[in-house]
Amino acid sequence: MKEKTQVEDINRGFYDFRFEEDEKDMLQSGITPDIIREISEEKNDPQWMREFRLKSLEIYNSTEMPPWGPSIEGLDMSKIVTYIRSKSRMNNQWEDVPQDIKETFERLGIPQAEREKLAGVGAQYDSELVYHNVRREVAEQGVVYTDLESAMYDERYADMIREHFMKLVPPTDHKFAALHGAVWSGGSFVYVPKGVHVDIPLQSYFRLNAQGAGQFEHTLIIVDEGAYLHFIEGCSAPKYYVASLHAGCVELFVAKNATLRYSTIENWSKNMYNLNTKRAIVEEGGKIEWVSGSFGSHVSYLYPMSILHGRGARAEFTGITFAGEGQDLDTGAKVVHAAPETSSYMNTRSISKSGGVNTFRSAVTVNRNAVGSKSSVSCESLMLDSISRSDTIPAMDIRTDDADIGHEAKIGRISDEAVFYLMSRGLSEENAKALIVSGFADNVSKELPLEYAVEMNNLITIEMKGSIG
Amino acid sequence: MGKIIINRLPVPTWRSLKANYAEVDYEPECAMPPSMILPEGMEPGFGENRCRIRTGCGEELSRELDKVPWTKYVYNADKVLDDPLRLYFMFEEDERAGIRAEINVGAGAGLEVYVIYESFENAKGIGAVQLEINAAENSRVKVTQLIDVSDGMDFINDIGAKVGSDAQVEITQVYLGGKNVFGGIYSALEGYRSVLRTDIGYKLDADRSLDINVVADHTGKRSESEINVRGVLSDKAKKVFRGTIDFKTGAREAKGAESEDVLLLNEEVVNKTIPLILCSEEDVEGSHGASIGRLSDSSVFYMMSRGISYEKVYEIMAEAKLNTVIRKTDDEEMLHRIEKALKRR
């Protein structure tokens, strides 16, 4: 008798600890103009931002829920707390961070990572950044890495932020972009000056500790001409018994001949609605590289978008999604070729098991002026049982004859032939299957810095049993 | 009169792509009975004007066709027929016509069907034909269609097929005429080892449009589907192709493959492609591949180095795209009609 290969769920025990919130730190749940005004007061918003938030709320109230994608009926916005006061000011010394928060990040290994392999770290706990620091030698190159709110008040960056904030993702984009515009809090601002190559990555880590709350951080990165940056984003939350919401927003501006690599390892708890929006605009000769690992969340809508705006701009998207029991993860990417000789490449993998639902959704649009553009999309899905689901929904909209567009998609299970081949080379069936599943995820792990690749592989605990009888 | 929604994508995607469905202004006012040449031994029957199975264009079209004041044509084959069934539809000037036909091929039987949709040269109306195919176990049905209505006329070509165990349905469609043309194919692959093969070819120019929706719904074990679409777009032509392979639970060892090859000849063409693979069964193999664009420089260079002019290279390659579809039929009359229609373009 043949037993089925068992692939364990992602081991989340590492992330499932939390400290109690003080209820007096939490604003009332729901979204009303009064709550929005209270957030503006708490954050001492400039006038333009106060008006922006209220306008976004109007847009939110008049915009319908997306009629496609996984169900978000379980998300009751009237029960979501949109803002939690921070227990402390933003710090640039770990010693100054409150003990329970510091302990949280230490258990997640953030301070150690900062010491060993990062050029700078930002740490957000619920609604606010609690720690931000950048290495002296990196700062001396003119690299700015700070929290967005501080930067908004710094006369050196205030105009830059006003010029770029929610310009790539306007509140009119969709309902949760409007929500973000109304209640955003926290997040990072990064500016890399012309020609500066930041050799080691910066990392922001987002931790949602409170249950029934939302996290709405805003990340704004500007990589100036000829510069290079690798930015890593990590997200986690402990296990809750009520729905929580993440509706962050990432806006990336990649100038002429600049390169930005944006890596994300997302492991939210399985009660999280992850409705995040990420978008990059890339100028002439520039390049955006997205590396994305989606493991957590109850429901995800996540499609990083690249607008190739300058001649010869490039985009690469490499992603893996692992959907287990109770998860409905709708992920993918969008690319708009809006200039000549632009190119894009998407390479994704998804694994579905134990009733998990994976949807790969993509859109490649080639505008009329994008002559000489090239795009290639490759997505592969692995079904590990028949109670799960895996859908592939790519779209291509091509409006010029001078384009070279390729697409391929495959769906299937672990190949018996591959298992047989490996077994004929002396591997046990268990090891053969484990090797195949690990290899399937290899497209993402090989794109990450070694330490993160190891972490990602640790995230996928693979346990095999079975025999051929 | 109002617009109806047809060719709906089984699972919607972003609305901004404007590709989740097509809209068409259609309400039939009259029937369009076909002329026909029947194989020996076949008598046409008539049935209630209702469609009993799901079709590619969908329910809203079916509801409109229910209004056609005519019966449904029914063609039954209960053995392997040597001669084909030939159906000819000729649409007149400004009519808004519709008709249904049903083809039932019994267990172990076989039938080839050739269908030609034509119109008066200056026809400006709209026509819709819905074809219901029931292929019983171990049967073979091969349908070849030529769509060659006038360039002023809109046309809807809708098919629904139910495929039994070990049965095979092959559909070949060549779209050459029409202003705004819509094609829908839905196939319920219910039987063990049931098979659907679809080959669609088109040549679109001027500001004409073609909107295609093909769905292969796999519920039968070891069922197989193959959807191939090849075509050429020039001038301001617009094409939307939605292709769905849906592996339902229980369709163990099923296989589905979609492929699309589009040659774009002008900078103002619009090509939209949405190839879906939906899967709730572990033990299946599904794949999709698409190649969209102009000819590669190396192909053009190679052919020009053999003395062929640049313009001729494209002409030859455009013909080659269509020929891979046209070659699926070996019926002389059909080949002659396709060739004649192609020459006019």
Image: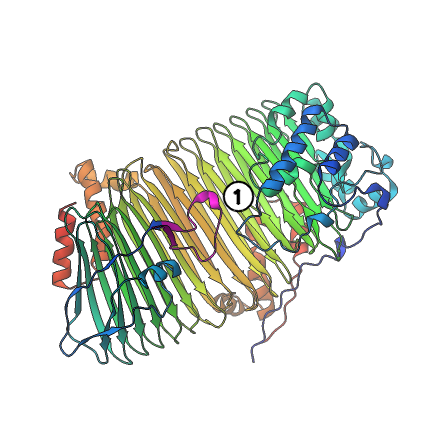
Along the line of sight, the residue nearer the viewer: B337 or B290 = B337
Q: Quadrant of residue A161?
A: top right
Q: Tag 1: residue type?
A: Phe
* Mark 1 residue element: strand
Please report the residue visible at 33 percent of the width from the left and 79 percent of the height from the top.
Answer: B137
Position of A52 with respect to A41 (left or right) is: left
Q: Could you tell me if residue A147 is visible in this image? A: no
The image quarter containing residue B116 is bottom left
Give the image location of residue A68, x and y in percent.
52, 52
**Residue B42, image x, y percentages:** 17, 77
- Is A380 inside the magenta-drawn segment? no
Give the letter of the chain under mark 1: A
The residue pinned by badge 1 equals A317
**Quarter of the view holding residue B118:** bottom left
User: What's drawn in magenta, residue-wise?
Assistant: B1-23
Q: Nearer the viewer, residue B193 or B30?
A: B30
